[in-house]
Amino acid sequence: MQPKSKRIIIDVNIWISYFIDKGIKTRFDKILNDSQFILLNSNVLETELFEVARRPKFKKLFDKQILAEFEHLYPLIVETVNVTSVVNVSPDPDDNYLLELAADGNADF
């Protein structure tokens, strides 16, 4: 019997670290290539991710071509969830969208 897939949410900060830190990239690649994990996404998360990645402070850290390729591949490696829940419990209200995604995407982590 195959183990149940883990439904996980990757925060924008972790995605950004993936591009910057080779140590994190190596460990994170294992997750990306492991069919045991389903990466959950929402329109809000995806918008936030690419807005942050395009900030001027990251321009010298990210290769434009690699970022463009990632933008193309991202929808292929995630499961986009139609988020309808409204959550207002996070100490940081800007993070409520992650809790909404967790609820509607039945996230394990």
Image (cartoon, rainbow, N blue to C red):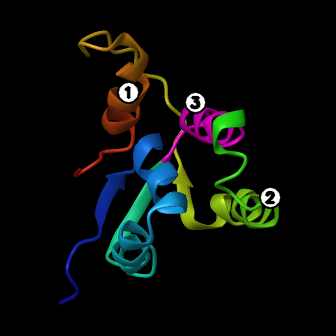
Is the C-beta separation of discs 1 and 3 under 8 Å?
A: no
Q: How many marks?
A: 3
Residue 57, quarter of picture: top right
Expressed as whole percent of the image width and height from the top left, the position of residue 69 reads 76, 66
Mark 3 Cα-neighbour bin, 10 Å: few <14, some 14–19, many ≥20: few
Q: Which residue is mark 3?
A: 44
Question: What is the secondary structure assignment of the residue under circle 3?
Answer: helix
Q: Residue at x 33, y 38 (%)?
A: 102
Q: Which residue is mark 2?
A: 64
Q: Reply yes or no: does residue 48 show up in magenta.
A: yes
Answer with mark 1 or mark 3, whichever residue precedes in sequence: 3
How far apart, in angstroms, are the residues tagged by discs 1 and 3? 10 Å
Task: Identify residue type, mark 2.
Answer: Lys
Q: Which residue is mark 1?
A: 100
Expressed as whole percent of the image width and height from the top left, the position of residue 104 reads 38, 35
Report the span colored magenta: 41-54
